[in-house]
Amino acid sequence: MTTTMPMVEMDNICKYFGNVIALSGVSMRVHAGEVMCLLGDNGAGKSTLIKTLSGVHQPSEGRMLVDGKQVLFSSPADALDHGIATVYQDLAMIPLMSVTRNFFMGREPRKGEGKGIFGALSNVDWDRANQVAKEEMAKIGIDVRDPGQAVGTLSGGERQCVAIARAVYFGAKVLILDEPTSALGVKQAAVVLRYVAQAKARGLAVIFITHNVHHAYPVGDAFTILKRGTSFGTFQKDEVTREEVLSMMAGGQEMDQLSAELEEFARTDADRAEGKTSGLEAAAAAEEALAKSVSDESHKLH
Ligand SMILES: Nc1ncnc2c1ncn2[C@@H]1O[C@H](COP(=O)(O)OP(=O)(O)O)[C@@H](O)[C@H]1O
Ligand SMILES: [Mg+2]
C-alpha cells in the first residue's frame, strides 16, 4: 500500500439513470505507476464508473479528485485536458484511415509556423508524422512497415496498441482501458497486456477494466471488484489470490453452487465409466441436474 497522493480518487460515487441505480457508493484510488484492475461481471457498473471519470457522465453523488484537486468534467474533451485518456474497445480507431492519422487524430506536426490557407491538413509534416507513428509503435514492439496503411489492416491487439500509444505520446497521466482484451485471442491479448505493463513503467496511472481475471491478475497491482453497482473493495495483489478475486466477482455462493454441480457431473460420469449406471440413466441424471440449476437461476431472476 503506497502512501503517496493518488493520481485519481473517486469517493462514494453514485450514479442513477432514472430508477436504475448503476453505482451505489463506489470508491477507488489509483496511484501513478500503478495498474488498478476494475473487475466485475456484465452489468456490474464498470463502464459507468469509468465514463463518470472520463467526462461522459456526471456523478449523481460523490466527488472525484485528480492529482489532489476536485474535478467535475463537462465532457470527455474536458477530462482529456486533465490528462485522462480513455480507450474504448470498439471506438478507438477509424479502420479506413492510416495508422498515422489514427495516431495523431488532427494533432499532426506542422511544417513551419503558419496555419496554411488550404485547410487544417494542408501543411502537415507527413514525413515527420509517419516517422513518429512508426517509432512509437516500434517502442512497444510492433513493427508497422508502412504507417500509411489503413489501421483496419492491423490485428485487433495492434489496433488497441495504436490507441494506447497515442494516449501515452500525448502525455496522458491516467490511462483507462475499457475491456481492451475481451474480443482478442490469447496471443493478441498478450500484446495489449505487455503494453499495459509498459504504460505503468512510464509512470501512468492505469485503470484496466475486464471481466477476465486471467488477463487482470498478471498485470494488476490492485483489484477493485464491482458487483451490481456496489464495490467489494480494493485489494492489493499480495492480499488476494486469483481464486479469491474470481470468487468475489462471481459472488462466493454462486461459485460454491457451481463447483458442487460440476462435482456432481464428474461423479455421474465416473459412475457411468465404471458401469454402475447405464449411459442413458447417466444422461438423464445430468439433464435433470442441469434443468434444476437452470430453474434455480430463473427463480433468482424473478
Ligand atoms: N445510459 C444508461 N441508461 C440506463 N441504464 C444504464 C445506462 N448505462 C448503464 N446502465 C445500466 O447500469 C448498469 C451497469 O452497466 P455498465 O456500467 O455498462 O456495466 P459493465 O460495464 O460492468 O458491464 C446496467 O444495469 C446497465 O443497464
Ligand atoms: Mg462495460
Image (tube, helix red, strand yellow):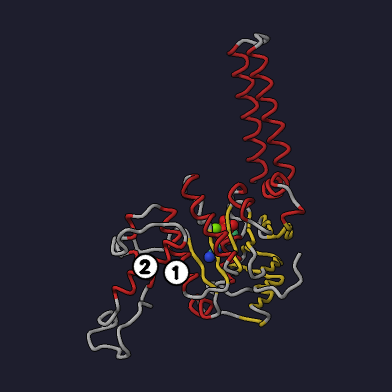
In what element is the residue under mark 2? helix
In what element is the residue under mark 1? helix
Q: Which mark is residue 166?
A: 1
| Residue 273 in picture, x, y percent from top left | 63, 13
Snapshot quadrant of residue 275: top right
Q: Which mark is residue 102?
A: 2
For the point 50% across and 56% down, the residue is 180
For the point 53% across and 62% down, the residue is 177
Q: Earlier in the sequence, mark 2 or mark 1?
A: 2
The amino acid type of the residue labelled 1 equals: Arg
- Classify the position of ligand 1 by quadrant: top left, top right, bottom left or bottom right: bottom right
| Residue 60 in picture, x, y percent from top left | 64, 73
For the point 61% across and 63% down, the residue is 20
Disc 2, disc 1: CB below 8 Å?
A: yes
> 173 or 253: nearer the eye?
173
Snapshot quadrant of residue 278: top right
| In the displayed structure image, the side of residue 199 where residue 252 appears, left or right | right
Snapshot quadrant of residue 209: bottom right
| In the displayed structure image, the side of residue 215 where residue 100 appears, left or right | left
| Residue 200 in picture, x, y percent from top left | 59, 64
| In the displayed structure image, the side of residue 199 where residue 139 appears, left or right | left
Q: Is residue 257 visible?
A: yes
For the point 62% across and 17% down, the residue is 282
Tally of numbered discs: 2
Disc 2 from disc 1: Cα separation: 8 Å
